[in-house]
Image (spheres, rainbow, N blue to C red):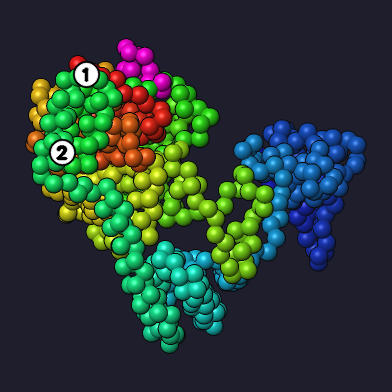
Amino acid sequence: MPIRENSFINDFMTGRSSSVGNKGQKGSRGPRGSRGASVPAWRSKLITQDEKDEKQTGSKTGRGKSCIWSKDAPTKRCARRLSSSMVGLAGGSPQYVELRGPDRTREQRCLDEITMKLEMGSVDDLWTIYVQSSAWHQDDGAKWPVQNEVFVKVRKRITFLLKQKMKKALEKDDVGEMEAAIRAADGKVQILATQGNEQFYEMDKIFERLEMKQEEQRRVMKGLKDSSTPAMAFHDKDAARSSLHEAIETKDIETIRTAIQKCMEAQVDVTDAAKHVAITSKYFAPEGEREKSLFPLNCFKGEGRCVHIVNLGPEMDLNVLARHGEVAGVKVKFYTDPNQVLVGKENRKTSTHKATTAVHTLHGSDHEHACEVTENPHLHTIILISGPEPARLEGDTDNLTKLLKFNKAGGALGIIASGNRGGHHFSLIRDANILLQVFGLDKMWGHDAAARVLSKQSATGSSGFNASHPLFSQIKHLDEGFSITGLDDMYLKRGFSELVRSSNGKLLACIKEPSASFSGDGSGPIFISGSATQLLCSKEAEGVETWINNVILYMALRQADVAEVYKP
C-alpha cells in the first residue's frame, strides 16, 4: 500500500523532524527536504502515479488525503458510486448513498393501525388487537406498546358493533342473522362483561326469539322432508315391486322409468332396475378415450358451471381438483364455512355500483345481496366435507334449510365424511349425519383404517367398484382411501345407485343420478361418500385421481344434460 506523506514513516524518511545542526535552537525545525534528494530508491517505487503527476504539475485535486473518493468521481455527491471509491467495495454493494429519513416509532405505528381498525375494522380485527393487548397473552412479539386508555376505545367499539349486530338481527327477525350474531358474540360477551361491566340485554331477546324461529324452521324442513317420504301401504309396495320386474322384462326405457319412480315413492329397492338403465351424455368423451377422464377438454367451457367445496374438517390440499376442473371448463372453489357459499355477496364484475359493500360498512350498515349459488342451482354444485365435533351445522337451521331447498330446486349436493383423522379420535361424520337427517336419509357410522386397493365387483353387494357405471370407464383398480366410514344399504332403497363397496363389505359411495328416472321431481343429484381422503388425489393411490375427477365433473350434469338407454 502506498505510504502517505502524513505518515510517521514518511516524516522520518523525509526529514520532517528537527535536524541535528539545529538542536541548540529551541523549537527550530530544519527545512523540509527534497523528496528526490532524501527518499531512497526503494521508497520512490512506492510513490503512486497520482503523487508523481501532482509533483510535476504542481496542482491539487482539491480533496484531502483522507477522502475516499478518487479524483475522477463526479462533483455532486448524489451521483457518486461507492463501487468507484477507494474503500474497495465490490459491484454487489449499493450504487448510491441513501440517507434514510427518521422512522416512526413502534408505538406510533400501533396507534395508526388501531385508529384505522376503529374506523373501518370488523369485530374480529378489533378482538384480535384486544386479546393481544391483554395481560394473559403469551406471545411477547405481538404486544402493543400503547397506553391502556387506547384499548378502552377498542373495547367500547367491539361492544357497540356486537350490540348493533344483535339489534339488526332482531329487527329483521331472520334466523340466519340471529345465529350469526350469536356466533360473533360467543366468547366475547363474557370477557367484555367481566372487564368492562358491559351488559348485553339483546342476547336474551335473541335466544327467546331464535328458539321460536328454529321451531318454525324445523316444521318447514319436516314438511319438505315429508313431501318426499312415501305414504304407501304394504300391499301397494308389493304391487310396485312386481310392476318393476314386469317393466324390466319389456326392455322399454319409458316403462322402466315409470316403474322406478313408483318404487322410489314406496322406498323399494331399485338396484335390479338400475342395472338396466345406462346414462349417456353429450359431454362424455368417446369410448376408448376415457383413460384420463370421462369428460373431454373444455366440454363445459363458457357455461358458467361451478363446484363449491366446503371443507369443515382438517386442512386438505385440493388444488388438483381445481386444475382438473379448469381443463374441462368448470370452476372449483374452496371454502371453510357454509356461509361463504350460501350468503349473498356483491359481484364486483357485474354490479353497476362499485364498492357499495365498503360504503355500507363505513356507514355502519349491512347491505343484502342475492346469493348467486341459490339463485342459479342448475349451474352450481355444493360438496360438503364433514368435520369434527362440535359440528359446524349443529343448530344451524338456516343453512340446513338453504341446502335442502337448493337440492330440491335442482342443485347438486355432495356429502362426504371419513373416519378419525387429522389428530381427532372420533369419526368425522357429525356434520354429514346432520345434513342426511334433514333429507330423511340414514346416518353414516363406524371407522376403518382401510387403505386397500379394490377391483371390479364380481357380483352385486361384493367388495369392489361398479365397473358398469360410466364413472369407472377404463379404471382397472381403485384405492379405497385410508380412514373411511360406512354407509347403510338403505340408501339403495331410496333411489341411490351403488358405486363403491369397501374391503370390509360396507357401502362406501353411492349416487342419486341426475336422470329423469331418479331425479324426475326436479331435484338435483346427490353424491354420498365415506372416504374423504380420496379427494387428495394422491399419485400413489391407484385410480383415485381419475375417479374423483369424474365425480366432480359428473355432479355438474343435470337432467337436461343426460339421457337414459336400456342396457341388457
Q: Residue at x 23, y 49 (%)?
A: 229
SS majority, magenta: loop
Specify the label residue 268 is tagged with.
2
Tell me: 28 left or right of 92: right
Instruction: Give 45 or 293, whichever is nearer the viewer.
Output: 293
Q: Which mark is residue 135?
A: none
Image quarter of the N terminus: top right
> Magenta residues, as a range?
282-293
Does 211 appear in magenta?
no
Query: Residue 6 placed where, x, y %?
Result: 74, 51
Residue that numbered label 1 is attached to = 251
Residue 228 lies, in percent from the top left, at 27, 47
Residue 433: image x %, image y %? 22, 52
Amino acid type at circle 2 is Val
Position in image of residue 424 (x %, y %): 21, 54
Residue at x 49% of width, y 69% of height? 172
* Quadrant of the snapshot with the C terminus: top left
